[in-house]
Image (spheres, rainbow, N blue to C red):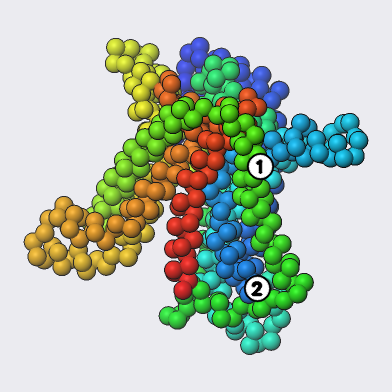
């Protein structure tokens, strides 16, 4: 709660800092603030429409239809989850810019002298990057909803004589609407929280404005007050997502389970099969295959410029931060989930719900919200050395990671607890076991897979995190994400390719595990 309360409390600040902040905000209101608002809304609208269209089309294709290559596309459509959006931005910019290989080849072939293709560093280019990086959120949730809930209703509609088009539009898609809304909300929250793409493309979003107010204008109160606007966007998204599924109720028969759609999927041949390949193949190409190929080209061309020794140091820092945070997040998740299971009172439920909201808070808001009270403590009691602890050691960075990613571990552990019958706890206590012994000897062995998944997911999220790491990292402790951003910003794509591709390789591990888990559940 501290980052959020600190950001909201910035409006109550007194003194010269607040007067200066108000002056900065008034100046921004007449200059760049309308651009921040307009660009953020336009980008969110484009991304929202894009991820819903692409994700829902792919989910419907692999769930409702049967065609050659369907099994491949079921897991391949998840691959863009392994690609950080800023890596996709670097790849497309390097390949499509004026001096890139594509435009150079077209100019050599046609004899043209000027720009052949429009500039990619704009709002439309950023929307393209986000859509093909984030559509798996919608695809994954919509696919699960269609598999679990739509099968028997689609079969009933078929027996009543409804054609396929009507079954899709009036039965399947309405059933998937809450899942689509949840996936779109996740994608939009990632878009609002992004700093790497907006900064690299030079577009004026609220996240970029927060960092400018903090780092360029050197006014933390103005940055915090801008953060409240970004936080309001996130709260609105959470409200709309919850409202979209508030009245949703599902009745699933005992025989209905994930994958029951397989036997009723309509077979496709000829032109319809080609259309299904295009619907599923284009997102995989645009979101994963082409960015990887685009990054491999400068890496192989400039391999001699790559500092392998320095890469080892960056990888070690990333691995160390990821492992420390993952272990602490798992410990916190165990405490919260076990407390909720053993003593489900109102206070415990509220604590767990508040911890679960951390993932929705953008990294920029967390950074500003943590540094504001640190600055106040440092100014009031400089002998405590709070500023040193939070900015010159890993403490502040790990704290920011835990605020944001503890919810990921908590969700995984809670899903594991949902599969442990409460009768196990009752039997252990009747035999005289204490709470600690129940946790150690009953729950822990049964939560092994959920805990491993939680560790892996938090580890990968920390490896890819950019906004908080960029500001809070200690001196001479660069990570793969920070170095990839800095080298790409300096147009040294050949050197940025290696850390960027290393992040992609690490991100592939949970994606492949997720795909395997889904197939196991569906069959």
Q: Residue 515: image x %, image y %? A: 49, 61
**Secondary structure of the residue carrying numbered label 1:** helix
Residue found at x 17% / y 58%:
441
* Distance CA(mark 1)–CA(mark 2): 30 Å
Mark 1 or 2, closer to the camera: 1
Q: Quadrant of residue 473?
A: top left
**Secondary structure of the residue carrying numbered label 2:** loop
Q: Residue 293: image x %, image y %? A: 64, 45
Residue found at x 84% / y 40%:
106
> Furthest-right residue in view?
111
Can you say whether 365 is above or below 459 in the image? above
The residue nearer to you, when weighing 458 against 415, is 458
Q: Quadrant of residue 215?
A: top right
The residue nearer to you, when weighing 73 against 194, is 73
Q: Residue 15: image x %, image y %? A: 48, 13
Residue 120 falls left or right of residue 523: right
Q: Residue 472: image x %, image y %? A: 44, 26
For label 2, the residue is 67
- Is the N terminus in the top left, top right, bottom left or bottom right quadrant? top left
Answer whether residue 362 is visible to the viewer in this image.
Answer: yes
The residue nearer to you, when weighing 162 against 461, is 461
For label 1, the residue is 294
Residue found at x 52% / y 55%:
242
Residue found at x 58% / y 59%:
76
Q: Quadrant of residue 175?
A: bottom right
The first of marks 1 and 2 along the sequence is 2
Labels 1 and 2 touching (C-beta < 8 A): no
Residue 420 falls left or right of residue 108: left
Can you say whether 355 is above or below 482 in the image? below
Neighbour class for label 2 at 10 Å: few (<14), some, many (≥20)? some
């Amino acid at each position: 709660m501290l980052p959020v309360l600190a950001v909201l409390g910035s409006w109550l600040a007194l003194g010269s800092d607040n007067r200066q902040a108000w002056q900065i905000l008034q100046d921004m209101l007449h200059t760049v603030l309308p651009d921040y608002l307009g660009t953020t809304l336009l980008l969110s609208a484009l991304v929202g429409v894009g991820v819903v269209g692409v994700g829902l089309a792919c989910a419907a294709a692999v769930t409702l239809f049967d065609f050659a290559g369907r099994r491949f596309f079921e897991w391949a459509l998840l691959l863009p989850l392994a690609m950080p959006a800023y890596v996709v931005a670097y790849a497309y910019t390097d390949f499509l810019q004026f001096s890139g290989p594509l435009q150079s080849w077209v100019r050599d072939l046609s004899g043209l002298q000027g720009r052949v293709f429009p500039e990619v560093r704009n709002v439309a280019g950023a929307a393209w990057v986000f859509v093909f990086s984030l559509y798996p959120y919608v695809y994954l949730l919509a696919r699960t909803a269609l598999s679990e809930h739509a099968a028997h209703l689609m079969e009933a509609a078929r027996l009543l004589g409804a054609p396929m088009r009507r079954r899709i539009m009036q039965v399947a898609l309405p059933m998937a609407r809450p899942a689509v809304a949840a996936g779109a909300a996740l994608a939009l929250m990632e878009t609002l929280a992004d700093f790497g793409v907006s900064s690299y493309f030079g577009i004026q979003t609220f996240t970029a404005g927060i960092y400018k107010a903090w780092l360029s204008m050197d006014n933390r109160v103005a940055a915090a007050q801008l953060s409240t606007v970004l936080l309001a966007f996130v709260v609105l998204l959470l409200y709309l997502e919850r409202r979209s599924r508030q009245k949703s109720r599902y009745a699933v028969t005992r025989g209905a389970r994930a994958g029951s759609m397989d036997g009723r999927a309509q077979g496709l041949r000829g032109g319809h099969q080609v259309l299904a390949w295009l619907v599923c193949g284009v997102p995989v190409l645009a979101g994963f295959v082409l960015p990887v190929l685009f990054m491999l080209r400068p890496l192989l061309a400039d391999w001699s410029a790559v500092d392998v020794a320095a890469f080892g140091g960056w990888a070690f820092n990333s691995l160390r931060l990821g492992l420390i945070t993952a272990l602490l997040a798992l410990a916190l998740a165990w405490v919260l989930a076990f407390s909720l299971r053993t003593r489900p009172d109102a206070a415990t439920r509220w604590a767990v719900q508040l911890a679960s909201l951390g993932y929705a808070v953008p990294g920029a808001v967390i950074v500003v919200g943590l540094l504001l009270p640190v600055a106040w403590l440092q100014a009031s009691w400089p002998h405590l050395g709070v500023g040193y602890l939070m900015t010159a050691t890993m403490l502040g960075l790990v704290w920011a990671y835990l605020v944001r990613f503890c919810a990921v571990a908590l969700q995984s552990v809670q899903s594991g607890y949902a599969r442990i019958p409460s009768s196990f706890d009752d039997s252990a206590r009747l035999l005289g076991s204490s709470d600690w012994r129940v946790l150690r000897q009953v729950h822990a062995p049964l939560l092994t897979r959920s805990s491993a998944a939680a560790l892996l997911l938090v580890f990968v999220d920390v490896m890819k995190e950019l906004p908080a790491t960029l500001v809070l990292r200690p001196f001479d402790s660069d990570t793969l994400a920070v170095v990839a951003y800095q080298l790409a910003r300096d147009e040294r794509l050949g050197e940025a390719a290696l850390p960027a591709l290393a992040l992609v390789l690490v991100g592939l591990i949970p994606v492949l595990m997720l795909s395997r888990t889904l197939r196991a559940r569906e069959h």
